[in-house]
Image (tube, helix red, strand yellow):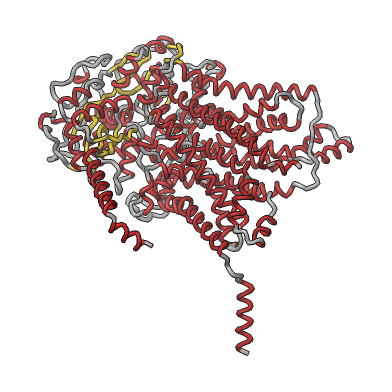
Amino acid sequence: MADTIQAAQAAQRAVVRPKISRDDWIMRSIMVVIGVFLLVAVLLPLYTMMSKSVEDKGGGFIGLANFSEYFSTPALFNSAFNSLSISITTTIIILIVTFIYAYALTRTCMPFKWFFKVVAVVPLLTPSLLGGISLIYWFGNQGVLKELLLGEKIYGPIGITMGSAYWVFPHALMIVITALSITDARLYEASDSLRASKLKTFFTVTIPGCKYGLISAGFVVFTLIFTDFGVPKVVGGNYNMLATDIYKQVIGQQNFQMGAVVSVVLLVPAVIAFSVDRIVQRKQIALLSARAVPYTPKPSRGRDLSMLAFCSVIAIIIIAMIGMAQYAALVTFWPYNLEFSLANYDFDVMDGGGWEAFWNSIEMALYTALFGTIIVFSGAYLMEKGRGFTTGRSILHMVAITPLAVPGMVLGLAYIFFFNHPDNPLHFIYGTMTILVVATIVHFYTVSHLTAVTALKQMDPEFESVSASLKTPFYKTFARVTVPVCLPAVFDISIYLFLNAMTTVSAVVFLYASDTTLASVAVLNMDDAGDVAPAAAMAMMIAYTCAAMRIAHVVLTRGIARKTQAWRHQ
Amino acid sequence: MLQYFRNTFKKSGAARTLVASAGLLVAASAAQAVDLTVYTAVEAEDLKKYAKAFNKINPDIKIKWVRDSTGIVTAKLLAEKNNPRADVVWGLAATSLMLLKAEGMTEPYAPMGVDKLDKKFVDADSPPHWTGMDAWIASVCFNTVEGKKHGLPVPTSWKDLTNPVYKGHVVMPNPNSSGTGFLDVSSWLQMFGEEGGWKFMDALHQNINWYTHSGSKPCKQAASGETPIGISFAFRGAKSKAKGAPLEIILPSEGIGWDMEATAIIKGTKKLAAAKKLVDFTITREANVMYNKGYAVVAYPGVAKKVKYFPEGILAAMIDNKFEWAATNRKRILTKWQSRYDSKSLPKKK
């Protein structure tokens, strides 16, 4: 009797726990390494930051006292209201503009589509500060088109709305274009054969078809604006927003506890927006059916021409913004001496770290792209294709998605609290290039991770099964099959990380040290000191670097794609 | 395997020489150069000059600058209190250094020749915790071109600035982030009394176009005509004027607030000897001559010469500043200032 039970138990054990192979061990240890990375770089700093918000200056626990102080200070509370109203207004404006622009690109036969696609990407190449700086030159008190504002001031809500709309435009556009591209042409045929009017078709087919994309774009844009700090810093005037408040609390008043409180307040809407977006995206995937027929637009003169006019206006605005920044950078002393000179490029006699900051930025961006891509892609691979460890894998996936909901400034502040604690064994990375790279990788982890996951999902799991049954170690399959097949995604991730590392301000503004100043932070500091033209000059240096990398990326991807992706088109 | 390495290593005489010479190399390079991390709020364009002058005398000490505006440097130092990264602070507002002294973060040290300095510029404790370099004084930058355009009279006093004619034409630094902003507010409270000071600021607030984060920005904005009037500091005004900006630098008749740029050693530095050498240099006559290139009032008596584009009569206009009072009341003043003026978040009605 006892023997049978023992035998049965042994059998059960054998069923539940297959022998763990060497392959599995390697896989698991790498997974643990990535898990520890995410724990140390994401969860622990956030935890430290949150606990700071319920502590007094000496570190004693005081419950919600800081929060009640915050909500009873009208100045601070007002900022929350301002942030909300600006974010909502701008989101609505940008959704309308983006929808028309994306519609023109996907559903019409408008000429020069390639040109409008290229122009729309331009705001991605610069720090968000650049929009604000250009607006000052266009509409400031010495602005060229000041009269257009009819006596209103650019410093304040008008400037923040315009500047924010400028830099979030490409972010929204990418999502809406995707949403409009995946509509099923058969729905239009059906609508046509039912003799529905064009307008009716628009409201019953087009809009419902892309509504999730629009909602998603809305939330992404809302979060971006709500947590951005660059634009209100430059053209905010006296109009306070939450993101600038954190800066003021921490930098101006040395009040780290209150900075942590504002961070938590900033985190709330960001987390809500993020959760809603996740739910919505899940529904969007469910909408796609395998039998969908791609939609091909038919020419319609009136529509195409009016779309051309609309897109041209938007394109002109974008070019005007970046063009003005370049012009202002070359002018000797605005507005009293309009002769051209390179005086504003003499960064070494100004705040922000000089030319060294520019080279540091490139170094930082390269490291971020290199290590970020390795960590993100291998992490995504193990989470997606790994065997066993199911709970661990889904927890890792959750953690990998968290950074999207964490605003950059909050992350930066959390890193100060966590890494600058003397008892932290990792304290030595504080004030080094390493912490900047880690912060930037984490800040942009989620989108990179999701890109990798999407690419990996397209690959048949059979590859892993076959190689496992052939006793090929997983890392060989990974290096010989997975990476080459996913190469376009790998390049996308690295260029995404590179561009963001060049342009980001929010996370790194609390973390740079004297020998690790960055170009984007230099833009901020020069503008802060009143050297607006040099700030524009540095922002344009960033833009040219990013544009060059982007072009290199396109060329490289095309070349590689011809070699590794030929199978896709057979 | 480790044992094997150890054994071969022991046996090999070459390895021993290698280790020895490596050790020597390390020792030699340690004697060669010391890196000193120096926090500062001195204007960026002067830093290279300062380091060069110091290295003429001490070529073996390399300065690693961490430069930011007063509020930021102070915040950084306080944030790193448990774990200081700075060895020396060279060129930060004396009120900030007093704050650090109160937090127990400064190392008392009497630099060589400290008795030669004007007593006003030296901490009263013995040995002193900080020593002053120069005075950095408030002033008003007035853009004559823009002033004419808007038909504005040239203001001569602080009270003038509350005249409704200047509504929407005045820019000043936010005292929460800017050291210059704070010295303005603290001087008004000292000159006009607590009640009168706040009353003055209430009236001035009506005319303020916006508050900036940094103290140099109002003057640079006045220089570029972004605003006709910027409340800033004289050094900045003189520099912009030298670049050809149509500026007039005004010392308001009631008196002007000022703060010292000062130097201190941070307690717990591992490079105390080098830090002392640096502080010794910062109070020399030669260093003071160097400060005098940009600042009209310096700590070493008899050094100061007139600075080009600086307004006349600075010494007479400087108020008798109560630094201790300003340092101890700093937090209270800033909180009150914020609740009164920072809450006006919506744009003013016209």
Q: Is residue A53 left or right of residue A200?
A: left
Residue placed furthest toward the bottom: A1
Is residue B113 in view?
Answer: yes
Q: Is residue A522 left or right of residue B299?
A: right
Which percent across, then down, holds residue A25?
54, 63
Judge whether A305 appears above or below A99 on screen: above
Is residue B101 in view?
Answer: no
Which percent across, then down, holds residue B252?
28, 19
Compare residues B160 and A134 and report the one nearer the observer.
Answer: A134
Q: Is residue A159 left or right of residue B326?
A: right
Compare residues B112 and B242 and report the one nearer the observer.
Answer: B112
Q: Quadrant of residue B157?
A: top left
Which percent across, then down, holds residue A184?
79, 41
Judge whether B219 appears above or below A189 on screen: above
Which percent across, then down, holds residue A64?
43, 52
Please give the name of the residue rendered at 46% of the width and 50% of the height, measured from the top-left corner.
A41
Image label count: 0
Please give the name of the residue rendered at 41% of the width and 55% of the height, measured from the top-left corner.
A63
Q: Quadrant of residue A297?
A: top right
Judge whether A431 appears above or below B63 on screen: below
| Quarter containing the C terminus of chain A | top right
Compare residues A380 and A259 and report the one nearer the observer.
Answer: A380
Compare residues A446 and A461 and report the one nearer the observer.
Answer: A461
| Quarter containing the N terminus of chain A | bottom right
